[in-house]
Image (spheres, helix red, strand yellow):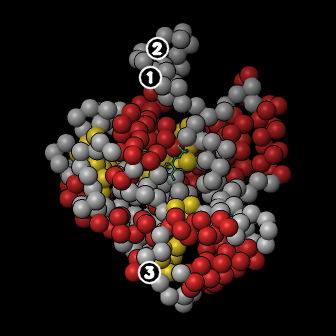
Amino acid sequence: MAENIPVSGPSITQKEIDYVADAAAHAWYKDANMYHERFEKAFAEYVGVKYAMALPSCTSAIHLALLALGVGPGDEVIVPDITWIASAAPIHYVGATVVFADIDPLTWCMSAESFQSCITERTKAVIPVDLYGNIPDMDAIRRIAKDHHIAIIEDAAEAIGSEYGGQKAGSLGDVGVFSFHGSKTMTTGEGGMLVTDSKDIFDRSSFLRDHGRIPGDRMFYNAEVAYKYKMSSMQAALGLAQLERIEELVNRKREIFSWYKEELHGIADLTLNCEHPGTKNTYWMVTVVVNSERNIKKEYLMDQLAQKNIDTRPFFHPLSSIPAYADVPRRAKEENPVSYAISPYGINLPCGMNITQDQVRYVCSQLVNIINKY
Ligand SMILES: *Cc1c(COP(=O)(O)O)cnc(C)c1O
């Protein structure tokens, strides 16, 4: 098979093209916000929260959430060591200190026990991440957070449509954040969403994302120096079209995962994403971890698969191990053994929306070959 198989990518139909064209033609003057309003309303309904705010990225959503919660210099914020850097970088933007918690060996999401062990009197917030579409033990995390008056920002960037105890991902903390980057399950090209049930958090975020203008301000008379975080109406139109197809998109991700599960079932030393009872995983990234006893590193696997025209990504490196966090006070290798034990041996397999079952078969046969030959 000569054609390159991409690791991820969206599903765009005529509906998306029509909505974007309509926004470009008509979302101006009195209708400038019509697509934002429809997108935000439909999104809040889908997630099951009161408020939703369309933003240029998930990174900006986390930044606003931290600001709205009053997190700043002197405060500590706990994030899992295994996640995309966007979960953690905004902690730096507000001048707070990042603390990396270990992950759970089964869900690969933040471990509730490790979260508890990271808490100090300075801990102000925690950012649990719904890694690769899975959801951490939110019952335990919420209990611990409540006991210590710690706010929860749920990073659901990778988990639109996932569920925990019948509740949708993004609705499980004080604030939820989503990404619509082109690699994510639903996309607006670039984009994000902040969701919450708290009027205070929503109002403060609305103010901060619009250069500190009091809502309804017609005099351009800014009350504070703040930020400019807005999505364009063309992106909102694209997002609305994707959201109207969300069941199809989520089902497609689950179907792709089921193909991999079928192909790799019974192959020794390989572990795929898990789905606990009570959780619905939407498998943003089909991920395979090779038993560490085989000592087959992710770099080797990625290189070998690339030679077969198969595009993959590494399991996230522990953030505490990468150059960007070389100066983090808490060097986490000893404290976060699970993160360091799993990360070297995991890769994300191709699971773009347009992948076919034949391509999945090809990827799996190549993967098994590479492992057997090692
Ligand atoms: C993609 C992603 C983000 C960042 O999203 P952007 O829209 O690119 O800012 C944040 N957190 C996680 C876990 C992600 O996967």
The residue positioned 69% from the left and 34% from the top of the image is: 233
Residue 31: percent from left, percent from top: 73, 28
- Quickly name the residue at label 3: 294
- Quickly name the residue at label 2: 222
Q: Amino acid at mark 1?
A: Ala
Is residue 178 visible to the viewer in this orientation of the structure? yes
Relative depth, front residue between 160 and 46: 160
Q: Amino acid at mark 3?
A: Arg
Few, some or many C-alpha atoms within 10 Å of disc 1 (few <14, some 14-19, many ≥20)?
Answer: some
The residue positioned 76% from the left and 77% from the top of the image is: 358
- Quickly name the residue at label 1: 226
Is label 1 within 8 A of ligand 1 (CB to nearest ligand atom)? no
Pointer 2 with pointer 3, Cβ within 8 A: no
Q: Amino acid at mark 2?
A: Asn
What is the distance, in whole Å, between disc 3 and disc 1 at their CAs?
51 Å
Left or right for 32, reference 215 = right
As displayed, is residue 47 above or below residue 36?
A: below
